Image (spheres, rainbow, N blue to C red):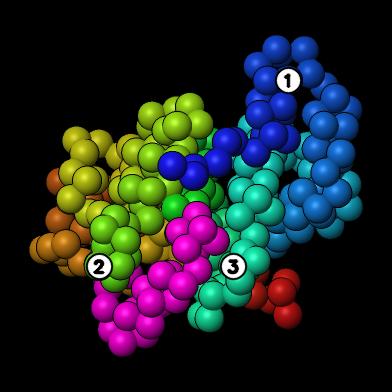
Amino acid sequence: NRLPSPPKVFHEVAVALAGRRAGVEDVALLIERDVALSAQLIRLVSSAFFGLPRRVRSVRGAIAYLGFNTVKTLVLSAAIVEQYRMSQPVRGFDLEALQSHALASAHIARQVIGQPSASETAFSAAMLQNVGQLLLASRAPHEYSEVLIRQREGAPPELSEVDVFGVAHPAVGAYLLGIWGLPGVLIRGVLSHHDLQRNVAPRMDVPLAVNIASKLARDPEVPALDDAGDDPFVIDLGHLKELALAHLLPEWRAAAERGLSTHEGDAG
C-alpha cells in the first residue's frame, strides 16, 4: 500500500522521447533540473564499462555518446537510487556494489543476447534487476537487516528474503515495474534473474540473457553444470547445450572478466 510512483524525471524523459521530436538539448534540460540525478547519471556513464574515449562531464555528452534509449534506462536506474536512498543505513547493504553489479550485468547481457533488436531491452532488464532489493531495504531497513544476517550465516539470498518478507526481491521489482507500465519482456527479465526454472526458453531471450549475465557479473568463473537444479549461482549448461549456445560460454566469461578488470582498474 506504499509503492511509489515512477520517478518524475524518468516519466518526463519517456514522454518527451515518445513524441519523437525531442532532441539532445530537450532531454538534457529535463534531466539537468535534478542536480543529484545528473551527477548520478554522469557517474554511471563515466564507468569504464562503457569504454568511452574520454570521460563524460555533462548530461549532453552522455546522450551524445550513448543515445536516448541507454540514457533513459540509466536515468530510471539513477532516479530509483535517489528516490530510495536510505534514511537508515542497513549494515552490510552496499548500494554502490549493487549498482556496479547491475551495470556489469547490463553490459554482459547485451553480448549474451546476441540480437541487436533485443540488446537494449536486455541492458535495461539487467540494469534494473535489483530494484526490488533496493525497495525492500529502503522501506523496511530493520527487516532487511535480518535478511542480511541470515545471508551471512549461509542462507540463500532469495530464501532469506522469503523467510522474512514472504517474497523475494525479483518478484517485488517485477511487480513495481509492472505497475509503472514497463514492457513485459523487461519485467520478465527482472523477475527471473535468479530463478533458473523460469528460464527454460526454446531460444535465447531476454530473461535467459539477464540470468546468465547476472551470474557472470558476480563471478566470471561461476560453475556451469549440466544438471544445475535450482542453484541460483550456477549456469544451466544443459539448457545452453539444448539451445546450441554452450560454445559461446567461454566468450561470455572472457567479456565479463575484461569488463570487471577494466572497471576495477578505473575505480582504483
Residues at marks 1 and 3 touching, judged by CB atoms closer than 8 Å:
no
* Residue 163: numbered disc: 2
Residue 265 in the image: above or below residue 174: below
Q: Which residue is mark 3?
A: 95
Instruction: Considering the whole magenta stretch, tell me its main secondary structure.
Output: helix
**In this view, the mark in front (1 or 2):** 2
Q: Residue at x 72, y 35 (%)?
A: 9
Residue 147 x, y percent position in the rendering? 37, 73
Q: Identify which amino acid the numbered label 1 is placed on.
A: Ala
The verdict on residue 10 being magenta is no
Q: Is residue 191 left or right of residue 72?
A: left
Residue 1 x, y percent position in the rendering? 44, 42
Of 104 and 30, the residue lying toward us: 30
Q: Is residue 137 left or right of residue 204?
A: right
Q: Which residue is mark 1?
A: 16
Residue 86 in the image: above or below residue 65: below
Of 226 and 46, the residue lying toward us: 46
Q: Which residues are magenta?
A: 135-159
Q: CA distance from mark 1 to mark 2?
A: 42 Å
Residue 137 in the image: above or below residue 152: above
Q: Residue at x 67, y 46 (%)?
A: 79
* Label 1 Cα neighbours within 10 Å, binned few <14 / some 14-19 / many ≥20: some
Q: CA distance from mark 2 to mark 3?
A: 22 Å
Of 236 and 144, the residue lying toward us: 144
Mark toward the start of the polypeptide (1 vs 2) = 1
**In this view, the mark in front (2 or 3):** 2
